[in-house]
Amino acid sequence: MRPVLMHVKARLIAPLLDYRWGSWSLICLYISIASGIVVGLQYDLTHPYYSVTALDLLVPYGEFFRSVHFYSSQFFFLLACIHFIAVFSKTDNYSQHDWVVLIMALVVGLLLLFTGYVLRDDNTGFSAGMIAEAILKNIPLVGNTLNSVLFSISEHGMQRVYVHHVITLDVFWLILSWNHLRRYRVKVTDHIPLICLTLGFCLMIAAPLEPEGLGITYISGPWFFLGLQELLRYFHPLFAGVIFPATFLVALLYARNQNRHFRKILWFIYIWLGIYALLSAIAWLR
Amino acid sequence: MVQTTGPNRPQHTPRRSVLAIGLLALVYPLLRFIGYEIPRKPNKVEIHKELPANGILVNSDFILFDRDNATWAVSRKCTHLGCKINYHETDNLLECPCHQSRFTIEGGVTRGPAKSNLTIYPVEKRDTSPYYIITT
């Protein structure tokens, strides 16, 4: 059994880890930023859903540019996650400070993705925004303040979310990733096939948009939010929306080879991911 | 000039401490200021048409019912996490599409995870247009 596993690891997994996931992720981020600027020119935060619908139906090539922005952002985050897994074994020489900063960059990347969903203001986006707002408000003492700074959709519409999506989170991500990006340079000209593939994919597949309809019985959130959505069904928002995700984040922060509890932390991460995947599957199948 | 007590170690001057305490004292009022929600000005929504035969009108923020000589408007904001609830005509109930909390058409909870009833808005019914004025 053991030689078979070693063979599978050597033949199938090892080559996968050697791909340039990080470079691809960065290229997708470049595409996402460029297309985001284009989409932002027609986005109206006072009438978010109307302007997104108009982008798809009225604005010439609007559907294409929105699709490019949507999918390149998804690819950026997914590839960043794969890159993280692929290089995990080579990160022993990172200082704890560098490690924490890079994990935070991943979190900010996820928030960028999330705020993008919310800004659509369609059925999924609006509901996801309201749920995020309710979760924040359930945090004792600082909940209202946090909501006021980050979302406050009920009071200010998309204003806060827009500012953070377009400026705050981008600046944070750049500050957090600055050292990492300085160390590993990426030439855009080396990745023409990936750019063409992304653009070709977006030419054929439109970005999702879910209009509000009478009698809709189920709204499923963004793919990374599904597990959380399911958990919120059974537990208090403070546990499901804050404590449970925070345990995963803390585990990641301490998942260093030098840590004497490394094995236990790794097991915790696997189990957490397993539970989250199961919850996501249940939510998806509903 | 900064005084040092050891190699490269700046001494904490009283001025710096005062500044730190002053900044800390500002944190609480700042948090209270940011966290405060100004109560929303009441918004009057006018309905200039008569309701359809089933006596229901679905608006973006509320659902208006006019049945059996009674008129009421129920908020569409689910009391669980704020998603927008929908009216299901076949079962004559209100349901949240996010976590399937159910409410009666009068706004009472019949199934969780929501724990409290929906908000009911005051409705003024008139004989001429606007036929209904809802204060949200």
Image (cartoon, coloured by chain):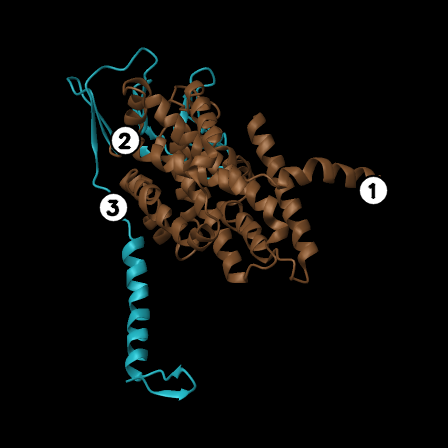
Chain colours: A brown, B cyan
- Image marks 1 and 3: residues in contact by CB distance under 8 Å: no
Quadrant in the picture for residue B5: bottom left
Tell me which corner region of the image, top left, top right, bottom left or bottom right, holds residue A116.
top left
Q: Please identify the quadrant where the N terminus of chain A is shown.
A: top right
Cα separation between marks 1 and 2: 56 Å
Few, some or many residues within 10 Å of mark 1 (<14, 14–19, 20+): few
Q: How far apart are marks 2 and 3 (CA)?
A: 29 Å
Taking the view exactly as shown, the residue that stands out farthest to the top is: B53
Judged by depth in the image, the label closer to the viewer, 1 or 2, is 1
Between disc 1 and disc 3, the foreground one is 1
Q: Please state which amino acid type lies under the numbered disc 1.
A: Arg
Q: Label 2: how many residues lie within 10 Å, few (<14), some (14-19) or many (20+)? A: many
Whole-percent x, y for residue A286 in the image? 56, 26
Q: In the rendered structure, which amino acid carries the disc numbered 3?
A: Pro
Give whichever of A214, A169 is nearer the camera: A169
Q: How crowded is mark 3: few (under 14 residues within 10 Å), some or many (20 or more)?
A: few
Residue under circle 3?
B39
Q: Residue A86 at x, y = what percent? A: 60, 44
Q: Which of B25 and B85 is in front in this view?
A: B25
Q: Residue B53 carries which label?
A: none
Mark 2 highlights which residue?
A43
Q: Disc 1 on helix, strand or loop?
A: helix
**Residue A2 — which label?**
1
Alpha carbon distance from label 1 to label 3: 66 Å
Q: In this view, does B108 lie to the left or right of B44?
A: right
Q: Same chain, marks 2 and 3?
A: no
**Relative depth, front residue between A242 and A5:** A5
- Point out the frontmost of discs 2 and 3: 2
Q: Residue at x 72, y 36 (%)?
A: A11
Pointer 3 chain: B
Q: What element carries label 3?
A: loop
* Residue B10 in sight from this viewpoint: yes
